[in-house]
Amino acid sequence: MSKTRFIVSPDVLTVKVVVAGPGGVGKTTLLKRHETNSYIPAVSTVGINFLVMDQEIGENIVRMAFWDYAGEDRFRSLFPGYCTGSSGAFVAFDTSRIQTLSEIPEWVRMIRQHNDPNIPIVLLGNKIDTIPEDQRDLISESAGNFVRQNKLSGYYLCSAKSGEGMESPFSHLGILIIENKKRKGQI
């Protein structure tokens, strides 16, 4: 399962993936880490960022068009229009500011309201590198409980800065999108 850049083939499955969550949790930085495999500090997103990456998943090539949405309240009214038509989603919180997890249900509600209610949504807890080892289990437990309560498709604790835990979420979401599209007869 590797990512590549823009394979030209009729067999490429192109999907829209929305990335949402409160401002300042590191959504753009997570995407940049995945794209470049290096830490690139991001400035605050104004409106939306757009990034396209090809991901090889088994025998499938999935072109993921990431719609990275600014988390500030002043942009929230625009979100429904941008998230419509998504095949999958990441919702992110900041593990060093656990209260940001409490803002995620509103993002999940909007994503489901404007897409298939069974859209695969994966929770990302960023900045795990800032959390002492002895506190990680508590954060993992909180994230796991949140995923069960909100019927999400899983969670990952990761760090855009150190790269810890960065490969699996993207592959996992790609697999879920492929499975969902097959179930619906779309591929």
Image (spheres, rainbow, N blue to C red):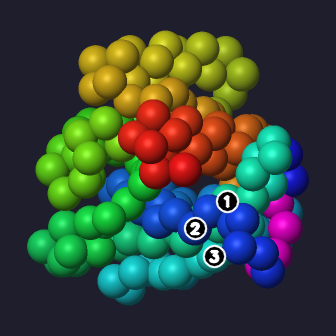
Occupied quadrant, residue 167 = top right
Mark 1 Cα shell of 10 Å, populated few (<14), some (14-19), many (≥20): many
Q: Amino acid at mark 1?
A: Val
Residue occupying the far bottom of the picture: 46
Q: Earlier in the sequence, mark 2 or mark 1?
A: 2
- Residue 14 is labelled as 2
Residue that badge 1 annotates: 62
Occupied quadrant, residue 175 = top right
Q: Amino acid at mark 3?
A: Val
Of residue 141 and residue 85, the one placed in the foreground of this image is 85
Q: Amino acid at mark 2?
A: Thr
Chief SS of the magenta region? loop
- Residue 52 is labelled as 3
Residue 112 can be seen, yes or no: yes
| Residue at (26% x, 47% y) in the render | 116
Mark 2 Cα shell of 10 Å, populated few (<14), some (14-19), many (≥20): some
Q: Are marks 2 and 3 in contact (CB under 8 Å)?
A: no
| Residue at (38% x, 60% y) in the render | 86
Mark 3 Cα shell of 10 Å, populated few (<14), some (14-19), many (≥20): some
Of residue 183 and residue 6, the one placed in the foreground of this image is 183
Relative height, residue 39 to residue 5 (above, below): above
Magenta stretch bounds: 3-7
Q: Earlier in the sequence, mark 1 or mark 3?
A: 3
Indicate yes or no whether the magenta region holds residue 24.
no
Cα separation, mark 1 vs mark 3, equals 10 Å
Q: Are marks 2 and 1 in contact (CB under 8 Å)?
A: yes
| Residue at (51% x, 28% y) in the render | 154
**Nearer to us: label 1 or label 3:** 1
Of residue 97 and residue 150, the one placed in the foreground of this image is 150
